[in-house]
Amino acid sequence: MATNSIKLLASDTHYALAELVSKRLGTPLTNVAIKRDSNKEVSFSIGESIRDEDIFIIMQIGSGIVNDKVIELLIMINACKTASARRITAILPNFPYARQDRKDKSRAPITAKLMADMLTTAGCDHVVTMDLHASQIQGFFDIPVDNLYAEPSVVKYIRETVNIDEAIIISPDAGGAKRAAGLADRLDLNFALIHKERARANEVSRMVLVGDVTDKVCIIVDDMADTCGTLAKAAEVLLDNGAKKVIAIVTHGILSGNAIKNINNSNLDRVVCTNTVPFEEKLPQCPRLDTIDISGVLAESIRRLHNGESISYLFRNATL
């Protein structure tokens, strides 16, 4: 057992997830002061001693404020390092810039690698994230990275809210086929695949269904939903092919741009997102949105990391 204690830190904006984790652990959030100057510079201070303590910084990074949040996180990590914390762990449920994980065209940056370098340089000792867009991002770091999975929580949600006998798992693209097949195996269901052709980034021109969805409740699973244009078009294709209704379940509900309008105007029965990304203010605008709470997974991972226990149990099992 560890002899030092857990200290939970969070920003003063979008800290709902941190409060849920704090409540589950029975550990209050550490008192911090964040000041934003008129020129948008951030100053940060910690209101109590954290010398030789085990620090966990929980940072929800959503759409529109990504860069501000990244800088805030780096400042918080560095403040903890200079305050002589024993270990600093960044809890990043949605890893920023995860989609920029490779050089897909000439003279393009690999920004996910840059993120890894900045976190390490700031003083981070450990990173915990969830459903990385590309698992190889873990290799960008020289420090330990634990990639948790939303799948156990998604399995629990489906079993509690959907008639399994009528369900089928759908992958919205070829890249997500492995994820969909794994979930289908866990639930003992069939799965189908939608092949999409893009005219340009974030714009899908044509979709083709591979599989039979007649009279089925289709569950589209993906790692993130940005503008939700793909999900809306996928729902249309599935219903045209005889589906009874369509539900979308995504880990990271970025919901940027016209996402809410696209959902409200679509044939989707509901869109279910985990709370890795803050979208509470969008719930009143869209009655079709639903949430899967993953604070239990994060809280248990923090407890296990602090006590030096394995967290592989969480890869296959949902917390209460």
Image (cartoon, rainbow, N blue to C red):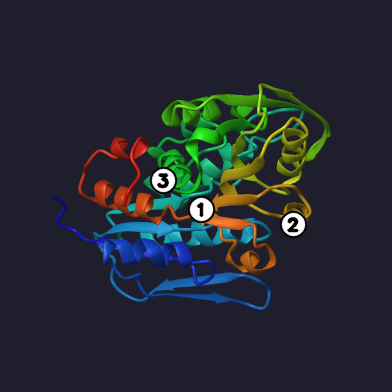
Locate residue 319, reporting x and y percent.
32, 48
Q: Residue at x 69, y 47 (%)?
A: 268
The label number, if any, that marks residue 276 in the structure image: 1
The residue sitting at the top extreme is 210
Which numbered mark, 2 or 1, is in the foreground of this view? 2
Circle 3/circle 1 CB separation < 8 Å: no
Q: CA distance from mark 2 to mark 1?
A: 22 Å
Assign a secondary structure to mark 3.
strand
Q: Residue at x 36, y 36 (%)?
A: 315
The three-letter code of the residue at mark 2 reads Asn
Residue designated by label 3:
128
Residue designated by label 2:
264
259 relative position to 22: left or right: right
Which numbered mark, 3 or 1, is in the foreground of this view? 1
Locate residue 38, reporting x and y percent.
67, 78
Residue 35 vertical placement versus 172 (above, below): below
Locate residue 205, reporting x and y percent.
85, 33
The three-letter code of the residue at mark 1 reads Thr
Q: Is any part of residue 61 visible from this angle?
A: no
How many neighbours does mark 2 have within 10 angstroms: few (below 14), some (14-19), or many (20 or more)? some
30 relative position to 226: left or right: left
User: 163 or 63: nearer the eye?
Assistant: 163
Q: Is any part of residue 305 visible from this angle?
A: yes
First in residue order: circle 2 vs circle 1: 2
User: 194 or 96: nearer the eye?
Assistant: 194
Q: CA distance from mark 3 to mark 1?
A: 12 Å
